[in-house]
Amino acid sequence: MTIWASIRASAPAMWTADEIAQLCYAHYNVRLPKQGKPEPNREWTLLAAVVKIQSPAGQTCDTTDKEAQVTKEVVSMGTGTKCIGQTKMRKSGDILNDSHAEIIARRSFQRYLLHQLHLAAVLKEDSIFVPGTQRGLWKLRPDLSFVFFSSHTPCGDASIIPMLESEEQPCCPVVRNWANNSSVERSENLEDSKNKRNCEDPDSPVAKKVKLGTPARALSGCVAHHGMLGSGKIKPDISSSNLTKEELAAAEGIAPGSFRVVDVYRTGAKCVPGETGDLREPGAAYHQVGLLRVKPGRGDRTCSMSCSDKMARWSVLGCQGALLMHFLEKPIYLSAVVIGKCPYSQEAMRRALTGRCQDIMALPRGFGVPELRIEQSSLLFEQSRCAVQAQRADGPGRLVPCGAAISWSAVPEHPLDVTANGFPQGTTKKEIGSPRARSRISKVELFRSFQKLLGSIAEDERPDSVRVQKLDSYQEYKEAAAAYQEAWSALRRKQPFASWIRNPPEYHQFK
């Protein structure tokens, strides 16, 4: 039985951020087993999910003149903080390269969409899809929309935000005396000054929450009490930063709500090779914003783009991916993104997810950059790093990210998938390469599900894109999704997306 909730609300506020967060947290606690969850008081993780919003029959999601009965249902969920290095990538498509929660939730969502297409196209049963105007194509029911939830801001550009003194800030800035340490990036950091995910590595050399260039004694009072800066009025150096106008205005003095900028939160995601690099100057000038970034690995560089960059891509291309576009009249766009309680900036979120995608020329029919509602919940994920840190106080041992990732999809068979290091948890070296050593959301398994769906449809009912040519490999099916590839090409013509790291073709030749 699926966890769901019905609420009474006045549209367009058909739901609140707290309702979305609470639903996801409840689903995590009730529907996900202990396997793959963090070890209490020692490990933490991140959570993401896709929530289906169903408005009343006959009403659209922008109804404004009466109360509406709204149904919310979690249809996919993911946890995780890890990412494999490029030397561990496999040409067989049977390993998960990126196990950050947002990516696990999205791949789990694709599995859900494949099941829903099977219901509609093969079983002719009730589904989220209705027939489109062209043969073999389907479209989302008009009363449905999808909200994406993440317990923390996406890594990368969305996490480069002003660090404000605030009583509401769940993770207070951690300060050391960095004034005489010019190699801060290679130094040992306190737990709270690591990358928000430890980015894939508990020893990640990232100091994202420290006030660079400022002696600890000058800020000790504000760190201890989240209070005033005192008479010194220490402000970050923003002269060479490229923060937004709103963020610069905030950094100049007192931010709205009487919060004062201390610095900027840092992201461990690194600028892609060939891209303009970070300035790495003290204070708010440490990062350049708006750039593409890759997730750092544990000594082994990754080829995985940051979650901010991937979510920006979804804003244009949809969440369904290239394969599923063979069956769809239009992409499946998110209507909203909700972030849990954590360091947060509305400006940074909008800049990262949609601001970089504006004014894209020559998008094919059906593609665009729909308006995206972005909100933050006041509810903290109980197994987030900040929550676990607070619970354990000065407990023994180090606080580390959970090594496992959990995938859950609203499908009838084997909805759960728990992985570690890109393979099902417990996989031995001897088993790698066998079907049993594949995650259900790996490229090869999603491709198998796609092929099974296609093979279950009568040839004269299949979409034209897969009927007019003989297709064999994963790469060939992806390239044959013409409109999707055209939209992707249009996006890559716009900066900064021209620098997107693409896997070599040989990693997509499996069948």
Image (cartoon, rainbow, N blue to C red):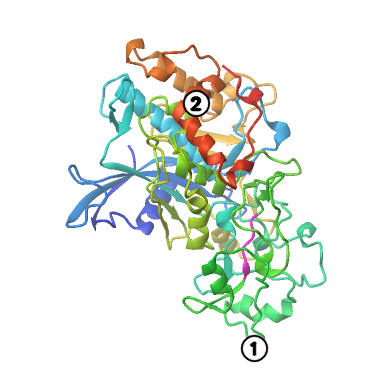
* Label 1 crowd bin: few (<14), some (14–19), many (20+), radius 10 Å: few
Q: How many marks?
A: 2
Quarter of the figure with residue 222 = bottom right
Q: Secondary structure at mark 1?
A: loop
- Where is mark 1, residue-wise? 231
Q: What is the chief secondary structure element of the magenta stretch?
A: loop
Give percent across and percent down for residue 490. Answer: 51, 38
Q: Secondary structure at mark 2?
A: helix
- Where is mark 2, residue-wise? 446
Residue sitting at the far front:
362
Residue 283 sits inside the magenta stretch: no
Quadrant where the C terminus lies?
A: top right
Residue 264 sits inside the magenta stretch: yes
Residue type highlighted by circle 1: Ser
* Residue under the image location 59 percent in, 33 percent down: 96
Specify the segment rendered in magenta. 263-267
Q: Closest to the observer: 133 or 71? A: 133
Residue type highlighted by circle 2: Leu
The circle drawn on residue 252 is none
- Marks 2,1: beta carbons within 8 A: no
* Residue under the image location 55 percent in, 23 percent down: 444
Distance of label 2 from label 1 (alpha carbons)? 59 Å
Q: Going by the image, does 295 lie left or right of 455?
A: right
